[in-house]
Image (cartoon, coloured by chain):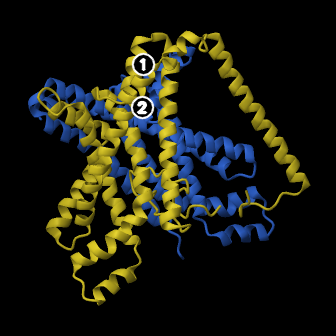
Amino acid sequence: MEPVFADFDLYLSAFWLTIQLFFWSALASLAFGTLLGALRVGPVAVMRRTAGTYVTVVRNTPLLIVFIFIFVVAPSLQWFVGTPFLVKGVIALSLYTSAFVCESVRSGINAVPLGQAEAARAIGMTFGDSMRHVILPQSFRAVVPPLASVLIALLKNTSVAAAFGLLEATARMRGFTNANADVRPEIFLLFALGYIVLVEILSAGAWTLERRWKVASR
Amino acid sequence: MTSILFDAPGPKTRGRHRLYTLATVVMLLALAGLLVARLVEFDQFAYAKWEPFLTPSYIEAILVDGLLETLKMASLAIVFAVVFGLVFGVGKMSEHRWLRWPSWLIVEFFRAVPVLLLMIFIYFAYGVGDGFGSFWAVVFALTLYNGSVLAEVFRAGVNAVPPGQAEAAYAIGMRKTQVMTIVLLPQAVKIMLPALISQLVVALKDTSLGAYVVAPGLTFVGGSIQDEFRESRLQTWTVVAVIYIGVNLLLTALATWLQHRLVGEKSPLDTTAIPGMQSTNTGGGAGGGIV
């Protein structure tokens, strides 16, 4: 433990980078994923199929390969050449996570009782109206638990950035264990603890939202 | 596709939808055109750059040293993870506190820690030198992570068995262990089998992380080819990605087929609500297939 506490500012700055990666990717993938989810349940067949294809392809690609496409392949087409590493990491994480956000949003819409959509249509609401006033507000509640798991997965997935020169927590742990072979388990536990604290904060937040938004009946 | 979310469109709406369709198609074509123009500009269609992937010895390397090793690691990890998940999943449901608590702690710990962090630690602490090497470091890391996820899946599966089953078993005089092993678990496994296959997709994708600790597998082979042919970066990773996607689609199809075969059209086990579980069920989690 001694070596980590001697360089504790490095530990903290590593987790700060992890948090930054997480925050910006979460924002971007929530926006893009919700858009994809809306396209996937919309009435226009081409949009549905495009969003569906994106989700299928990205979901079945390992995250590391997505990173490789942004960090290694794109530069060979002169894309993302001078882009900062943090931005490239956020792009890779967001492209990947959006597919899972899309699926959560869709499952939330699926969880809204059938009668609600039928009633909205029966009183003459258009697709936009019924989505805005009836379906989406209810699906937001149902979507909290799956979305929380997607965000927790995203938080853990930031560790993949370690393989691409970003000195976030996982890369930093590797550095520490290289230099201090005799206390490896302790160093691992200390870094694991950092991730666990962040995960617990996320799940506590989700749990509070879930309780506050719980649908009264059913 | 009929949906409950919107009515059958009238003439005006149909016209509007045609407009949206046209706009989407134009946008997609523009994107594809942009990409192709770029590919042509940087001469990415050149035969020389694709040559390695038409050469038998390289194809063999990709399939044998790459795909086969990846599949081996993923299936070993899932087999061990099932054992791990059974032990700690049942442990978490135990009535004895001394069993429930440690099981809970272990499952929570390995679910919250990134699998790459775990992999790096296992490899550098126990894998290098006289250790068990990077192949097993990947397998063990994936076992611990997927096992703890499966522990939750097992719990959800046992809870998904109708309560009358356990009641009936107790009524004919079975003991607690018998109820679990003879009545609940066999039925739970049937419900869970699709979720298990889906978890295989997750494990398969995560084996690619092994490249970071120089474990064999598709990503590692891709890296070697890329080192040899610096100009074929795009081609290499496109081929690797296509193989990953193809195999995972096959596994997903298998999971869907099993779902229909074993569980029927009933809603699949809701695994999306389990933290860390990235369900690849095509039904899409909660109440799948309504809309």
Callouts 2 and 1 close, C-beta under 8 Å: no
Residue B82 image-quadrant placement: bottom left
Q: Nearer the viewer, residue B66 or B233?
A: B66
How many dots with numbers? 2
Whole-percent x and y of residue A213?
50, 65
The residue at which mark 1 appears reads as: B57
Above or below B284: residue A100: above
Label ID, residue B11: none
Give the residue type that dot 2 points to: Leu
Whole-percent x and y of residue A170?
29, 33
Give the residue type that dot 1 points to: Ser
User: In the visual, does B146 lie left or right of A46?
Assistant: left
Q: Nearer the viewer, residue B15 or B126?
A: B126
Callout 2 secondary element: helix
The blue-coloured chain is labelled: A
The residue at which mark 2 appears reads as: A64
Q: Could you tell me if residue A196 is visible in this image?
A: no
Q: Residues within 10 Å of mark 2 (few under 14, many from 20)?
A: many
User: Disc 2 versus disc 1: distance between alpha carbons?
Assistant: 25 Å
Q: Quadrant of the C terminus of chain B?
A: bottom right
Q: Could you tell me if residue B21 is visible in this image?
A: yes
